[in-house]
């Protein structure tokens, strides 16, 4: 789910796919289908088009056999984005919804939890790109909050917290039952993120998309806008069907040993330590077993 219309989405998606030997969209909508919030295309916005390129290309890179719907909101307003979350939830065979957008917490945020409850659908949200910030909807008890790591290879893979990843203790939301009793939890409020993946722009990923309003090219992007679709795609590969949001969260926290326990680094005053922490959650997926 993103905002604004990405008119060259299929073309750019196919150039990315050809570069890496991935399935391409031939026009049937079997690989990538664009869905509007209403009956016509929203306005075009280059910055959001870059976000959309990142989201669809890296979901595709991780889960190349999955069909991807790009659901485009008319604007960045909460009403429009949430309307598209609802629309995405009802699309055929949807199992995972990735939301690479966020706002700061607000006192009435729990009133919107119902948008993230749909049978057999898991919801994933970016924890944000400001170290230690608490972002919504990732903070919702019904959303799997995805934080960010730095991933480097120096004679072996090294992973640590990305200093820009959002996370912390909610100002408003009570500690969910799936986090109760988990070592490392702080206080009586919701802790985030739940899981993490690569997000550091300095260890980012290649994206083919609009460099300006008239041309496209290769870029390197990071942020939790990258880690969120990656984790959603890994969940899709697992084949698990989330009977409810609480079911999927419970599986993650029960299967903590199935995630790479990231330690080292910090973000906004949150240290990344062994076990659960407010930078990387339970860690990054080893594969699909944790889901």
Image (tube, rainbow, N blue to C red):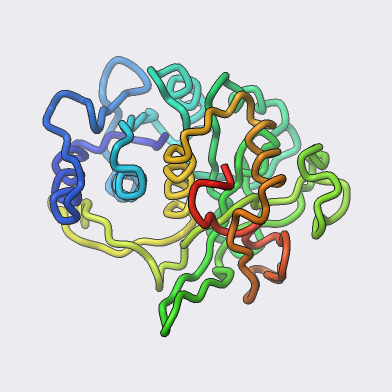
Q: For the view shown, which residue lies furthest in the bottom direction? A: 155
Q: Is residue 264 left or right of residue 40?
A: right
Percent coordinates x, y for residue 51 in the rendering: 35, 48
Using residue 156 as the reference point, say whether residue 65 is left or right of it: left
Q: Nearer the viewer, residue 155 or 280?
A: 155
Between 278 and 84, which is closer to the camera in this rendering? 278
Where in the figure is residue 290, as x and y percent of width and height? Answer: 58, 47
Q: Residue at x 55, y 32 (%)?
A: 122
Question: Vertically, is 227 above or below 44?
Answer: below
* Residue at screen point 86% across, 48% down: 181
Residue drawn at point x = 48 percent, y = 52 percent:
287
Q: How many marks?
A: 0
Quadrant of residue 243 in the image?
top right
Figure quadrant of residue 140: top right
Query: Viewed as shown, does residue 124 lie left or right of 41?
Result: right
The N terminus sits in image quarter: top left
The quarter of the rendered structure image containing the C terminus is top right
**Where is residue 138 shown, x and y percent of the image?**
61, 43
Return the residue nearer the eye: 114 or 48: 114
The residue that appears at 22% across and 26% down in the rendered structure is: 30
Residue 186 in which image quadrant: bottom right
On screen, residue 270 above or below 127:
below
> Can you say whether 87 is above or below 245 in the image?
above
Percent x, y of residue 236: 44, 37
């Amino acid at each position: 789910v993103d905002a604004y219309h990405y008119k060259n989405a299929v073309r750019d998606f196919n150039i990315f796919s050809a570069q890496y030997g991935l399935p391409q969209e031939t026009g049937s909508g079997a690989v990538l289908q664009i869905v509007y919030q209403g009956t016509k295309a929203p306005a075009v916005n280059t910055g959001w088009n870059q976000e959309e390129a990142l989201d669809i290309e890296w979901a595709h890179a991780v889960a190349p056999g999955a069909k991807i719907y790009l659901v485009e909101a008319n604007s960045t307003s909460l009403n429009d984005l949430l309307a598209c979350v609802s629309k995405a939830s009802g699309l055929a065979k949807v199992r995972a919804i990735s939301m690479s957008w966020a706002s700061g917490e607000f006192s009435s945020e729990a009133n919107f939890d119902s948008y993230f409850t749909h049978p057999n659908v898991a919801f994933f949200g970016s924890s944000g790109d400001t170290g230690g910030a608490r972002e919504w909807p990732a903070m919702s008890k019904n959303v799997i909050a995805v934080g960010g790591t730095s991933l480097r290879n120096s004679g072996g893979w090294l992973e640590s917290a990305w200093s820009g990843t959002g996370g912390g203790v909610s100002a408003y939301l009570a500690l969910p039952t799936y986090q109760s009793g988990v070592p490392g939890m702080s206080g009586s409020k919701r802790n985030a993120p739940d899981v993490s993946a690569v997000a550091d722009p300095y260890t980012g990923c290649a994206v083919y998309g609009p460099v300006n309003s008239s041309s496209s090219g290769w870029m390197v992007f990071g942020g939790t806008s990258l880690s969120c679709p990656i984790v959603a795609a890994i969940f899709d590969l697992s084949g698990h069907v989330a009977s409810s949001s609480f079911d999927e969260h419970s599986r993650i926290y029960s299967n903590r040993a199935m995630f790479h326990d990231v330690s080292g680094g910090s973000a906004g005053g949150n240290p990344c330590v062994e076990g659960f922490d407010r930078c990387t959650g339970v860690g990054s997926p080893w594969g699909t077993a944790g889901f």
